[in-house]
Amino acid sequence: MNINKIGLLGAGTMGQGIAWALAAAGKEVVLYDIKEEFCVKAVAQIGKSLTRAEEKGSVAAGTMEAVVSKIKPTGNLDDLAGVDFIVECVFENMDVKKEVYTKLDNLLKPEVIIATNTSSLSLTEIAAITERADKVIGMHFFNPANVMKLVEIIPAIQTSQATIDIVTELAREIGKKPVQVKEGPGFVVNRILIPGINEAAYILYEGLASAADIDTAMKLGAGWPMGPLALADLVGVDIALAVCNTLFNETGDPKYRPAPPLRQLVRAGWLGMKSKKGFFDYNK
């Protein structure tokens, strides 16, 4: 199956990185969000980053133009009608995803696969919304998606082997390393990583150490490339909280109960790097 034109829903941090990765691999990307300005801003940010990379000599001259020219920003869902494949990375809320998938089912060609970038929600529940349940699958990228090599491939119970094979090959085609995971809350990486972030937030809440010292301890004592609280800011504190809630609700295990600082920061709108403040202040 030739996949050349890919529709991408969501122009946030993950959507931006995935659009970059797909376009850099030569795919034509139709980037959709509820407001076209969000998509235009995301493309401009990709262009800015690649321009700096060209100036430093870390990418070849002309890379920026080659990548940016492959991404079409749009606020009109109908522009996705002719795509060969969909990557969905809208907000981690099942009601939001159900609304989106119902619209996609009516819009797309019957053979189009819908791959969701969900980090924790049930693939089987998402697939059941559609009339193409055999063509729904998890394709979980990691932030920053243009750099990180791993992609978790998560079939729903309804997903066909043909769909698994196509998506696995697509991941390889865009330079990623696919790992197949059975459906389960948090899959592999977030099942291990998010509790680590949550425990660091509990340590902060209990006053055992400062945020900076918690992160330094994990970097120097455990070999983490960045500390868990800085990582929460990078991923988005709201995303970390959403995954914690999903793990807790799906398993009922109290070890996944979100730490109070996660809730407090989200309530304050301090979501990490994207809002310039989270566990750390990025306005300085």
Image (tube, rainbow, N blue to C red):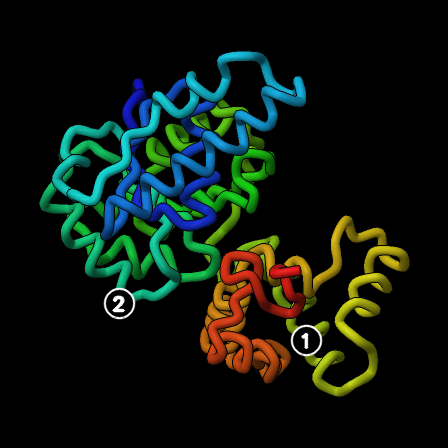
**Three-letter amino acid code at the position of disc 2:** Asp
Quarter holding residue 100? bottom left
Quarter holding residue 272? bottom right
Give the residue number, with chain letter if any, for mark 1. 201
Give the residue number, with chain letter if any, for mark 2. 95
Q: CA distance from mark 2 to mark 1?
A: 28 Å
**Three-letter amino acid code at the position of disc 1:** Ala
Closer to us: 25 or 280: 280
Residue 14 on image: x %, y %: 46, 47
Q: Looking at the image, how many numbered discs can be counted on the residues?
A: 2
Quarter holding residue 233? bottom right
Q: Residue at x 82, y 83 (%)?
A: 208
Residue 61 on image: x %, y %: 55, 12
Indicate left or right for 230 with 180 as reference: right
Return the disc, 2 or 1, that comes first in the chain's sequence: 2
Residue 204 on image: x %, y %: 73, 79
Q: Nearer the viewer, mark 2 or mark 1?
A: 1
Establish if 185 lies above or below 177: below
Residue 54 on image: x %, y %: 59, 20
Question: Can residue 159 be seen from the camera position used here?
Answer: no
